[in-house]
Image (spheres, rainbow, N blue to C red):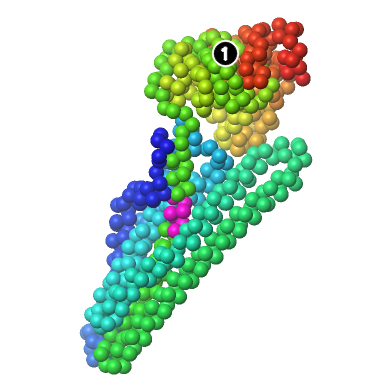
Amino acid sequence: MPTGGPTGGLVLRQAIRGQRRRVIAASLLGMTHQGCEALVPVVIGATIDTAVATGSSDALLRLLLVLAVLFLVLSTCYRTSARITEGGGELAAHRLRLDLAARVLHPRGGADANRLPGALTSIATNDARRVGSVATVISYGVSAVAALVISAVALLRISVPLGLLVLLGIPPLLWLGHRISRPLERRSETEQERAAHASGVAADLVAGLRVLKGMGAESAAVTRYRATSQDSLSAALRAARSRAGHEGAVLALTGVFIAVIGVVGAYLAVDGTISVGDLVAAVGLAQFLLGPFQLLTYVNAELAQGRASARRIAEVLASPVTVEKGHDVPDGRTAGHLALRGVTLGALRGVDLELPAGSLTGVVARDPAAAHDLLVCLAREADPAEGAVELDGAPLTSLDPDALRRVVLVAHHDADLFESTLLDNVRAGADGGTAAVERALRASAADDVARLLPDGGDTLLAERGRSLSGGQRQRVALARALAADRPVLVLHDPTTAVDTVTESRIAARLREVRRDRTTVLVTTSPALLAVTDRVVVLEDGAVRASGHHTELLAADATYRAAVLA
């Protein structure tokens, strides 16, 4: 995915282009509706002149029939146009959400850099909805302009001065409306940014609620969120005031314009230049013009907000990727030999490490940052600043990231569960059948969790698995990683919340279920390290020691302190 991605203008154009047929159909129907609306005062004026003034019943019936047809057509066109435009807006927003989801989930990453999950959610919901609304209001704008043109033509037939007044007055009014919308556009963008940030902070606080309560930090968290929420509220109020000022200014301008049309029409009627029926038609058209002008005001405001939201969406879609695209694809004969050669990234400093195919290796890192950066390298969420990571002799940078992750699975410590059944969570990444899932459930002791639930494995879990205890969540997450049965599996602290007896069972079963498969355990758990073939100790970002767990316990005081603390 290139770093020079779409701009806000391109996002808007694509949203409209994707609904081109709907926009055209709705615009035609909308123009018909507005045209019929504009013709109503013209027909009423004609009725006064040709039927009421002359006392002709036949003419009156004919013109009343014409009015009935006009109302039937305009009401039908309005309902149909509204249905089409609303559907187009929803479809445009839906496609934007799909594009955003694809970018956020892209194997080469980058979209979530410096963005809270809640902020991304806000962009995919509120901003996508606002851009989708642009596809909706385009047909409204076309219909309003058509209504102004039809009204001007009708007024020209009644009186050339009245028609010219409308034709010459509309462009300046539209230009002024556009200029007045500029502050609204800026403030709308700020409003959406602050709202997204507040949403992200709220989601962050909810996710860490247990930790905050355990630390007694609820008041500090509330204070932080109150300040963030207040900023969001202030931005929303500024945007609301700007929108109110924009609409008020435009309506004041259009009100003056319509009043001028009415005064000129009255003067022409008094002067005898136009008839009474023409005056009624002119006044009716002047009043009718308020509707298209109000519609254009609404369209202008929606376009201003849509442009601001489109820029925010474009920023996500154009986010630079964190890893370059590789072209090679690992085949089905992947042995799973991993090697780090002089790897430097974050807390890692020139790490040289061999992880033989089929081995079970423990990695002890007292510095959490070093453990995190090692996982990032192995998952290829970022490429090393120096050195290389290899899989069966091939640098990871030469491999397609998506294909690589079908071979190498890195299960992070904080992996979340889905709001689905326990079995659905375990089966999420499974390539095998029921037997593989059952082996994973047993190896992780998640089968014990299923037995305790009211509907067993079919029990629906709450969001992020919050209906389970911490240890139960870890066992289900571990079962999901094991059920995927990847040639290379990297587990980070998979049993920190599990009791010691269950942890020992998991350790023994883990070795069995991963036999002849490359497995890396980044942990300080003595029970897990005891079943490994070898333990590697990272200190100060480099490999400091290597050996069997029991040997290191006996000979290395630092290692003893790290795993037995």
Q: Is residue 287 left or right of residue 407?
A: left
Q: Quadrant of the N terminus?
A: top left
Residue at disc 1, secondary structure: strand
Q: Residue at x 69, y 21 (%)?
A: 366
Is 305 magenta? The answer is: yes
Identify which amino acid the numbered label 1 is placed on.
Leu
**Exactly how many numbered labels are in the figure?**
1
Decide if residue 69 is in sight here: no
Q: Is residue 333 left or right of residue 424?
A: left
Which residue occupies the extreme bottom position in the image?
A: 271
Q: Is residue 417 left or right of residue 12?
A: right
Q: Residue at x 64, y 52 (%)?
A: 229
Decide if residue 502 is in sight here: yes
Q: Residue at x 48, y 71 (%)?
A: 248
Q: Quadrant of residue 413?
A: top right
* Of the pair 153 and 486, the residue shown nearer to us: 153
Q: Is residue 439 above or below residue 243?
A: above
Residue 359 horizontal/vertical position (percent): 57, 9
Q: Residues within 10 Å of mark 1 (few under 14, many from 20)?
A: some
Is 164 magenta? The answer is: no
Q: Determine which residue is flagged by label 1.
A: 353
Residue 315 horizontal/vertical position (percent): 46, 44
* Of the pair 364 and 405, the residue shown nearer to us: 364
Residue 502 horizontal/vertical position (percent): 70, 19
Q: Residue at x 42, y 27 (%)?
A: 325
Majority SS type along the magenta span: helix
Q: Quadrant of residue 67?
A: bottom left
- Give the extent of the magenta segment: 304-310
* Of the pair 58 and 39, the residue shown nearer to us: 39
Residue 520 horizontal/vertical position (percent): 59, 16
Q: Quadrant of the C terminus?
A: top right
